[in-house]
Amino acid sequence: MSATAPEQVAHRAGANTFRHVVFSQGQIATRVAEMGAGISDHYPASEPLLVLGLLKGSFIFMADLVRTIHRPLHLDFLVASSYGKATVSSGRVNLLYDPDTSFEGKHLLIVEDIIDSGNTLKQLLPDLRRRGAKSVEVCALLHKRLVALEPEARWVGFDCPDEFVVGYGLDHAEDFRHLPFIGSL
Ligand code: IMP
Ligand code: MG
């Protein structure tokens, strides 16, 4: 009896199997480092920077990104209500966790895994902007370019095909988040 290779198991969950790799581990690492360098250069070193990751999807991206930002920063997370098991966005986005720390006088950098309908950020950003931050910018790993944000995300890793993508933090009904690359179902 032949054992199933570990990578084949990892790429399959229930009825879902990977169709193809969209962004490889190497491509992601290179691009994340470029974004980290850009972010390091953008903010005056003496001004406080608070990096806020939107959970859960951004957890791997956030962890890799902050390690390529070479300047002082604090980090925290936001938890917004999610799609649940659906693959299509619907309705109101609520914050389920919001940091205690004040935003007053700080540069806020919101780290998002993917901009799809743009609903999440369109709803959250106006609230975040009202809280006295010195600036509020978005760094998204992926952007499907189905919508334009106003203002647009300052840092975008990759323009993403309009497919449901998983891996590197992105899930489908909680499957596939742990994969080190991004693939399409
Ligand atoms: P929005 O449609 O821009 O509001 O996207 C909100 C959230 O939905 C993202 O932060 C992701 O967590 C999730 N999402 C959107 N598109 C995809 C996808 O293609 N794969 C996995 N998650 C997605
Ligand atoms: Mg998600």
Image (cartoon, helix red, strand yellow):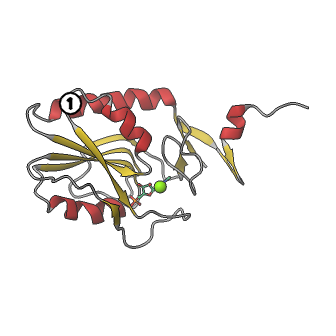
Q: Residue at 55% of width from left, 40% of height from top? A: 178
Which amino acid, by three-letter code, is at mark 1? Ser
Most distant residue in the front direction:
100
In the picture as drawn, the residue positioned furthest to the bottom comes out as 91
Pinpoint residue 34: horizontal percent, then vertical percent. 31, 28
Q: Using a 10 Å C-alpha cutoff, classify the residue at mark 1 as few (fewer than 14 neighbours), some (14 to 19) or many (20 or more).
A: some
- In which of the image's four quarters is ligand 1 placed? bottom left
Q: How many marks?
A: 1
For residue 30, what is the image quadrant? Answer: top left
Q: Which residue is mark 1?
A: 40
Q: Position of residue 9 (x, y in %)?
A: 71, 39
List x then y, in percent, for residue 81: 41, 64
Q: Quarter-wise, where is residue 117 in the image? A: bottom left
Depth order, front residue of 143/173: 173
Query: Going 42% across and 28% down the picture, which residue do you hit?
Result: 29
Residue occupying the point 44% across, 32% down: 28
Quarter of the figure with residue 72: top left
Report whether the residue tagged 1 is closer than 8 Å to ligand 1.
no
Nearest the viewer among 120 and 184 is: 120
- The residue nearer to you, when weighing 31 against 129, is 129
Q: In which quadrant of the rendered image does the N terminus lie?
A: top right
**Is 91 drawn above or below residue 46 in the view shown?**
below
Residue 181 image position (x, y, % from top left): 53, 36
Q: Horizontal placement of 26 versus 42: left or right?
A: right
Tell me the element at label 1: helix
